[in-house]
Amino acid sequence: MSAPSSKPTVTEREARQVAEAAREQDWRKPSFAKELFLGRFRLDLIHPHPLPAAEDSRRGEEFLAKLRVFCETQIDAARIEREARIPDEVIAGLKELGALGMKIDTKYGGLGLTQVYYNKALALAGSACPAVGVLLSAHQSIGVPQPLKLFGTDEQKAEFLPRCARTDISAFLLTEPDVGSDPARLATSAVPDGDAYVLDGVKLWTTNGVIADLLVVMARVPKSAEGKGGITAFVVETDSPGITVENRNAFMGLRGIENGVTRFHQVRVPAANRIGPEGAGLKIALTTLNTGRLSLPASCVAAGKWCLKIAREWSAAREQWGRPIAEHEAVGAKISFIAATTFALEAVLDLSSQMADEDRNDIRIEGALAKLFASEMGWLMADELVQIRGGRGFETAESLAARGEKAVPAEQVLRDLRINRIFEGSTEIMHLLIAREAVDAHLKVAGDLIDPDKSLQDKAKAGAGAGVFYAKWLPKLVAGSGQLPGTYGEFRHGVDLSRHLRYVERNARKLARSTFYAMSRWQGRMETKQGFLGRIVDIGAELFAMSAACVRAELLRTQGDHGREAYQLADAFCEQSRIRVEELFGRLWTNTDAIDHKVVEGVMGGAYEWLEQGIVDPSGDGPWIADTTPGPSKADNLHRPVD
C-alpha cells in the first residue's frame, strides 16, 4: 500500500464546509447560553442550582480524600519541575489509586465519577503538580476513554476500557506540523487494506504520546466505491510496527508532560479499531470536547485558589510604608480581583459540570465558554500574583529556597497556565466556534439570504421565513423582566444580587440586538469580522459567569455554607464584570479593526521592514514547519512505556 505523498489542498470555503459538516446540526435539548445569545435570559435552566446525587457525592468525596493523601505524600512538584519528568513510581501510584479510570464506568473497572467530581479531582491533582493534572486529563478527557464512551461499540469498550481504567495510558492525536485548527488539510492517511487500514503520517504535540499505550488517531480515509471516506478516528496500539516517537517536546511550562512527535509508517490497524463510521472523526472529536474542555477550567480554578492563598499570606507578611501591602489600594484591588474571579470560575465550572452530568441540557456553548473564560482569567490571576509578589514573583522557587525563603513557584504557575489559552481550541478559535453556535438560529432562518451561491428563488424563500421569525423575535428584545425593579427578589439577602441578574437580562437582549444589527449590516461578510465576533462572545462569557456566580451564591446561602461571604464575592465579581461588559459593548462599534487591517497589510507587504532594523535575531536555522513527508522514520524511537 502506498500513502498519498502530498497534503490536501483546500480552499477557504472547502475548509469551512468540513468544519460545518462536523458540527452538531440540531439542538435537541435546551441551552442556557444559546438562549442568552438570543436575548432570552432563561434563569430557570440553571436555578435552583442542580446538585449531584447523594451516592455520587459520597463516592466522589471518598476518592478525593485518597487522592489528597497521595498528592501530599507522593508527588514532589519541585522534582518534576527540575527533572522535567513525572517519576514512573508516581504514575504507577496513580494507576494503583484508580486515577486513570475516574471517568470510566465501574463495570469496566473504573471509578465511575461524575463530571463534577472528576473535575474536582483534576483540580486537586493539578494543584499538587500541573503536569500530573494534564497527564490524567489528556488520558481521560480526550484520550481513548471518552470517545469510546460516546461512540464505541460494546466490543471496543469491553476490550479497551478495562485497560484504560487501570494500566494503559492513552493519548489523542489530531494536530500535525502543518495542520492545527484547520482539519480540512489533515494529511495523515488511513488506506483500507482487507480487514485493516494502513496509516501513514506525522502527528505533533501528542500529549501523553511519549508514554502512551493506546492512541486515538485521526486520519483521512480516501473516498472509494465501498465507503465515503473522510477524517476517521481509530484506536491504535502504540507498540504496533511502524510507529516511532521521534521527539519529546519541551515547553516554557508544564515541563513534566510527555508530549512528542509521532510518525506512522505503514502501520496496520484492524478495521475493528475504527471508532464510528468513516468520515465521522471530526464530529467525534468535537463532541468529545464538549465536556472534555471542562478539564481546563478545573486547572484554572485550582490555580486561582492557590493564587488567592499565596496573595493573602504574602500580603499580610510583607510590609510597605508602615503597613501590610494588602492595605494599599493598588495591591488590594488585585487581591479582590483574584478572590472574586476564583469564585466565579468555580461557579461556572461546577454549574457546567453538573449540567453535563444531568444531560438535560445541551452544554456545547457552556463548555466552550467555560474553557475560554477560565483560560483567559486564570492567566490574568497568575499574572497579578506575580505582580503582588514583585521581584520574588519573577524569581524561581528553587532560587528562593536556595537563599532561605519560602519556595513559592509563582513564575512557574504563570508559565504553566499560558498554554490553556492555546490548546484544546485557542482563544481565537474558541471565539469563532462559539460565535458560530451563537448565530445558529439566525443562519437557519436567514442563512440563504447571505449565501452568495444561493439562487434568487432560494433567497426569496429564505426571506419569507426570516420575516416570520424576526417579526416574532425582535419585539421581545425591546423590554423584559430586567427592567422591573422587583425581579429576581429571591437573590436579595443583605447583599442585593438581583440587580446583577436584571443587568444580565437587559444586556442579553442588547447583545442579541447588536448581533442582529451586525448581521444586517455585514451579511455575508459577517464571518470575516473576527474582532466583532470575539467581543460578542466575550460579552456572553461575562454574562454567563455573572449568572453562575449569583446562582452559586444563592445555593451556598440555602445550604448554610458561607452564604454571606459567597454573596459578597458574587457581588464583587459582578461589579468587576459589568465594567468589562460596558467596555466590550463600546468596542463593538468603536475600535481599531479597520486601521489594524491596513497596518497588517503594510507589515506583510514589507512596508515597515525598516522598523525591524537595529536588532540581532537569535533564532536558529531551519524551516518554519518541519518536513512531514510520509516514509520510514530516521530517528530513534523515544517511546517510553510505564509499567
Image (cartoon, rainbow, N blue to C red):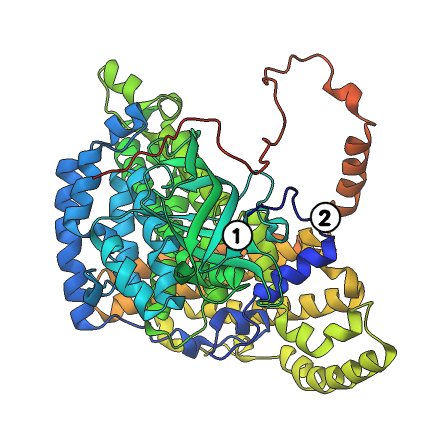
Instruction: Return the residue nearer the eye: 205 or 506.
Output: 205
Name the disc covering residue 259, or none.
none
Tell me the quarter of the image containing the C terminus.
top left
Which numbered marker is on residue 219?
A: 1
- The amino acid type of the residue labelled 2 equals Asn
Residue 340 in view of the camera: no
Amino acid type for the residue under numbered disc 1: Ala
Q: Label 2 to label 1, Cα distance in Å?
A: 41 Å
Q: x and y percent of residue 408 in the render? A: 28, 28
Q: Considering only order in the chain, which callout, 1 or 2, is on the residue closer to the N terminus?
A: 1
What mark, if any, has residue 591 been given in the picture?
A: 2
Quarter of image, res 150: bottom left
Q: Residue at x 63, y 49 (%)?
A: 185
Q: Residue at x 59, y 44 (%)?
A: 179
Q: Is 90 displayed left or right of 15 in the figure?
A: left
Query: Which residue occupies the foreground of this view, 471 or 433?
Result: 433
Percent position of residue 134, x then y: 34, 44
Q: Provide the secondary structure element on which disc 1 rests.
A: strand
Looking at the picture, does residue 386 appear above or below residue 609? below
Q: Position of residue 411 (x, y in %)?
A: 38, 28
Report helix, strand or loop for mark 2. loop
Instruction: Judge by depth and name the residue closer to the eye, 527 or 640.
Output: 640
**Dots 2 and 1: beta carbons under 8 Å?**
no
Q: Nearer the viewer, mark 2 or mark 1?
A: 1
Disc 1 crowd, CA 10 A, few/some/many (<14, 14-19, 20+): many
Residue at the image position 67 percent from the left and 86 percent from the top: 472
